[in-house]
Amino acid sequence: MYIRRQIEQQLSYLSEHFPAVVITGARQTGKTTLVKHLMDANPEMTYVTLDYPRIRDLARTDPELFLQQYPAPIIIDEIQYAPELLPYVKIRIDENRVPGQFFLTGSQMFRLMKNVTESLAGRTGILSLYGLSRSEILGTEEIPFLPSNKMTLKSTETISTVFDKIYRGSMPQMIIDPDLTPESYFGEYLQTYLERDIRDLLEIKNESKFLKFLSCVAVRTGQELNLNDLGKDIGIDTKTAESWLSLLVSSGLVYLLQPYSNNTIKRIVKRPKLYFMDTGLACYLSLWNNPRVLEISAMAGAMFETYVVSEMIKEYANQGIDVRSRLTYYRDNNGREIDLMIMENGILYPIEIKKSADPGKDALKNFNVLKALPNEIGAGAVICLSPVMIPLDKQNKIIPIGMI
């Protein structure tokens, strides 16, 4: 079963303008399925995966012979296993600079992007693929969210339907197989992640301690990053905690939302907020095994916020937009916080995220701090569990979760 991905249009666009396209993303988000779907419309294209040890060895030891054996146009899956190929791909591109020759996928983003930047600068378009977005699951048109967008007036989402989605997450296999339990899927997922990514990237002497680190990060989703506290909870130093967290970020499992920054504002907190990109994995790691219990727990608000923020990230990434240039959050030393701010054409759109059906005007109280910022302030929103969109004042409104 193939679920149409919103990123397909951007993939097609980049393939018409760049000789190579790189698709990065966490394991099992659908990169291989996406590029194989691309082959359906391009039967002359070759597909090869470096998962196979013999093929991987050929790519590493004799890249020239590999590219003779598998000529362009070609899809090379798991390219991070053979960075030795990239200089030879560059030579091929420079000899014949035709768009859409090479499609490269990889799940170890830090290592992959370092090698791509060094070898293929100016020759490649880059996309990040995450789990399925709400629009992809529902089969509807996807437009990056802004509070000023036109929307329907009602939503059919309830707290139960939302937390069912949060509990299962957005991995394609979890969506297409409703009988697959999170315990079965994510247990295997973590084992694969440890064996194929972590051991390859970093020598982890104590895997149980690393798994505990994963769980401690998961229970902190939606919170400001504090590496000192993380290290203390696990019994590792801050430098190790930073190194391990960088692996989660480079693997596409975790996103660090940066704070709004302006040199004229002196009292803004500078620590990023941490979000798991798949709420199902976050639930599994933090030991929630029932969505009904989760929705009334102390962690429900953080999981709801994680769900909303991850959806925003997917929407922008699916359009090929650098999320870092669009999404930030605000928090100052007085504890005043705005969950999310979207920057679009120099305008800041403030967003609060509340696990409530009727948050009221009090949810807007921190929007006043934006008056001190140099940017123009656009329409604001409180994303929540209300069934209908309701104006709160002339500029701000309640927006149901079902409309993002």
Image: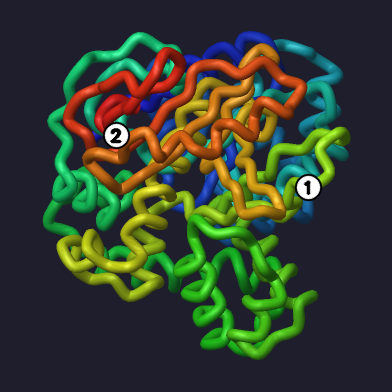
The image's mark for residue 267 is 1
Q: Residue at 70% of width from left, 38% of height from top?
A: 260
Considering depth in this image, is 265 or 80 the residue closer to the camera? 265
Q: Is residue 184 above or below residue 146?
A: below
Report how far apart the C-alphas of labels 2 and 1 lie in the structure.
31 Å
Considering depth in this image, is 151 or 192 the residue closer to the camera? 151
Count of numbered tags: 2
The quadrant the C terminus occupies is top left
In the displayed structure, does residue 148 sit left or right of residue 209?
left
- Looking at the rendered structure, the kind of residue marked 2 is Ile
Q: Which residue is mark 2?
A: 401
The quadrant the N terminus occupies is top left
In the displayed structure, does residue 92 sit left or right of residue 336?
right
Label 1: how many Cα within 10 Å (few below 14, some 14–19, many 20+): few
The answer to whether residue 361 of the structure is visible from this angle is: yes
- Looking at the rendered structure, the kind of residue marked 1 is Arg
Q: Position of residue 126 (x, y in %)?
A: 66, 29
